[in-house]
Amino acid sequence: MGSKLDSALKAWSRQLGAENIDTDAPACAQAGRSTFSEPHEGVIAVLRPKGRGDVKACVEIAGKHGIALYPISRGRNWGYGSAAPAAGSCAVLDLRRLDAISDYDARLGSVSVGPGVTQQALSQFLESNGDQHWIDATGTTVDSSILGNALDRGNGYSPYAEHCVHICALEAVLADGSTITTGFGAFGEKARAANAYKWGVGPSLDSLFFQSNLAIITRATIWLLPKPEYFQAFFFSVKHDDDIGDVVDALTPLRLAGLLNSAVHIGNVYRVISTMQQYPFGEQSTVPIEPARIETFKKEAGVEAWSGTGALYGTKAQVTEARKRLKRALKGKVSRLQFLDDRMLAIARRIAPLYRMATGIDLQRILGLLKPVYGIMQGRPSSAVIGSVYWRKRMSVPEQGNPDRDACGLIWCPLISPAKGEVVAQAVEIASQLLLERGFEPGITVTHLTERAIDVVISITYDRETEGEDERAKAAYLELLERLGAEGFYPYRLATLGMGVMDGMSTETRAVLTKLKQAFDPKGLISPGRYLR
Ligand SMILES: Cc1cc2nc3c(=O)[nH]c(=O)nc-3n(C[C@H](O)[C@H](O)[C@H](O)COP(=O)(O)OP(=O)(O)OC[C@H]3O[C@@H](n4cnc5c(N)ncnc54)[C@H](O)[C@@H]3O)c2cc1C
């Protein structure tokens, strides 16, 4: 590869300027780091193009010299592979400089973004442009990408939680250097509905570009949630581990009827404890955490087996009706069902000191814990939850969390279950048992992602600096995929470690996917090994 690589680096350097290309070992090592053991050789360069023209030129150079590219938007894909390529010997194509926000349509709630646009940037842009729309924020850091998240089919909290649904007009640079725009964008700039309608006419190409390696996306239109007339968050607790199925069954009819239109997140005690504190190594040197310690934590923190969070969005009348139905549906199944809106929040803040004097309860602390998630549900991203990734670290959580830098171990396994209580409970049971046996706390969130589907997000959190943990975590993840697969549960999104699970698909399906890759990218230039081989 030596002379081909040298020629490619020279050509990229001429195109981008030497300051926008890194080949030194520390920069390449950093780009190749993730929150689990890297299964492949390192990154060979990091390229930072500025616009679509640069991207096209980078692809053409890659094609001429046979060097693969691994495009990332902000590279914050923590728990799934960060910025690290899914296969060895790639140049990372870091698209952060394509950060334009344009074509904001305040009437229809759409905006065009480049891959470099962060949650923070878009949320601030909307606030300073009349505050009429909210983004659907995620639980990750404020500097993660709107577009990168959607391309990996990420999700958030609001009625627009499924990001791959609320996006259109994808501008894609293909492996031969040509550029297409999906939907009506294929008809060029004069197409009136390019930003308002996803499908265009004829076969739709959009879906091919999510969780794939068929193109590099340089821009797309995002649909924004109109700021609702009224917003009310709700929080509840569930006493026993086994009650999760009943709660799912209580919520599904509301979701199907459209009375509950957002993604309710219900986290188990392992997930909650990791957001509130780090592993109590001072009290217990072995892992996983003792059940007795969990019981003490529950008492001290006032939490139960599961903690639910969601929000109601609509007119005051719609929210009032939904609230009534929600209360009725959850009666006897949850405890401490509490509703919170901006007015109540302001009052609580004012009375917190007096309340503490009168009752001893630290309302200020409770509000501090609720604030980030309350904001996220209103489209205001927060980096607060990143602390949970430091759960098993022996260092304290830094001001600016960066799990790659700090060798935090994290692997997500988000499987999809039908929204039926007993099925969700079975998945939770399998994951909990297996991870505890393998020495990991099974942090799990159960999310009503759509009307009919639940996202059961299982996390494996550990310290990469503990000898042997990388290998144990990887083995546990692969075993989890296998055990769940044996019961008919499959992940909707994969860590680069687990992309082999696609091999379990039928031969016919795999053959079609292979043909697609060959048609789009016969030389294997774009993100080799990412979902498609
Ligand atoms: C504490 C915590 C909470 C989290 N909460 C959430 C959550 O609520 N929801 C959620 O979805 N995720 C969550 N995550 C996971 C992850 O951090 C986010 O999904 C994050 O948005 C992904 O990073 P990014 O936006 O920088 O995308 P990137 O890392 O840039 O992109 C993701 C992948 O998509 C591909 N890609 C990116 N851009 C392009 C492009 N332009 N063209 C072609 N391919 C491309 C690449 O293969 C890349 O690896 C969480 C992680 C942590 C640690």
Image (cartoon, grey):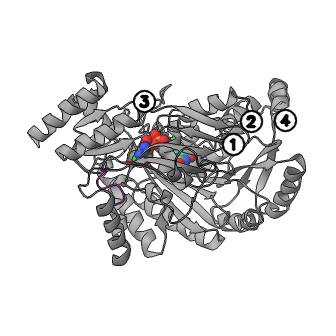
- The secondary structure making up most of the magenta span is loop
- The residue wearing badge 1 is 109
Q: Which residue type carries mark 2? A: Gln
SS category of the residue bearing label 1: loop
For marks 2 and 3, give the CA distance. 27 Å
Badge 1: how crowded within 10 Å, few (<14), some, or many (20+)? some
Confirm or deny contact between disc 2 and disc 3 (CB under 8 A).
no
First along the sequence among labels 4 and 2: 2
Confirm or deny contact between disc 1 and disc 2 (CB under 8 A).
yes
User: Can residue 370 be seen at all in this image of the molecule?
Assistant: yes
Q: Compare residues 261 and 170 and report the one nearer the observer.
A: 170
Task: Please state the horizontal and vertical placement of residue 22, each as a whole percent of the image.
Answer: 26, 28
- The residue wearing badge 4 is 344
Q: Which residues are magenta?
A: 526-533
Farthest-out residue, left: 3
* Residue 132's disc number: 2
Quadrant position of the N terminus in the picture: top left
First along the sequence among labels 3 and 1: 3
Of circles 4 and 2, the one toward us is 2
Q: Which residue type carries mark 4? A: Met
Task: Please state the horizontal and vertical placement of residue 108, each as a whole percent of the image.
Answer: 71, 44
Of circles 4 and 1, the one toward us is 1
Snapshot quadrant of residue 406: top left
SS category of the residue bearing label 2: loop
Q: Which residue type carries mark 3? A: Arg
For marks 4 and 1, give the CA distance. 29 Å
First along the sequence among labels 4 and 1: 1
Quadrant position of the C terminus in the picture: bottom left
- The residue wearing badge 3 is 97
